[in-house]
Amino acid sequence: MKLGRQPRKWLDKKSKLGFRGYPVGTIAFYGPDAQRASKVAVAVIVAPDTEPVALRRWFAESGDIRNDVAILEEVALFLRDHEARSVAMTEGIFGCPHEEGVDYPEGEPCPLCPFWAGRDRPLVV
């Protein structure tokens, strides 16, 4: 699996190929609003209806993590190391980068991300 010098392009291409079997790598971007991603969460699932066998998160204090070549290269290498045959990647930002029940109380909006208050946030794997 050739990675090359453009990991974002490699990830986009891999995700556009659709389902090609297991293991499946999932990539979701999170941010304080719908414009800037400050977190990426990547999981590897080896069979249907199973929990991920590997989960890793990367964070960016500034800038958009979707444009951080070094982090995207780590994401691509993580998926390659786990021999992901398929990749599912969110198009936009999936929600707040903080975890409900970990960073703030369950059932309450994140106090650090007012943009997401009142918006449904999908469950994080």
Image (cartoon, rainbow, N blue to C red):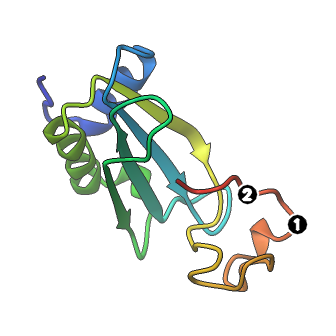
Q: Which mark is residue 121?
A: 2
Q: Is residue 56 left or right of residue 30?
A: left
* Above or below: residue 21 compared with residue 58: above
Pointer 1 and pointer 2: residues touching (CB < 8 Å)? no
Q: Is there any visible trace of residue 87 in the rendered image?
A: yes
* Residue corresponding to mark 1: 118
Dot 2 falls on a residue whose secondary structure is loop
Q: Is residue 72 left or right of residue 120?
A: left
Mark 2 crowd level (few <14, some 14–19, many ≥20, 10 Å Cα): few
Q: Residue drawn at (39%, 47%), measured in percent from left and top?
A: 52
Q: Is residue 55 left or right of residue 124?
A: left
Q: Residue drawn at (33%, 24%), measured in percent from left and top?
A: 22
Q: Is there any visible trace of residue 64 in the rendered image?
A: no
Dot 1 falls on a residue whose secondary structure is loop
Residue 81 position in % (x across, y down): 14, 40
Residue 5 position in % (x across, y down): 15, 36
Residue 40 position in % (x across, y down): 43, 56
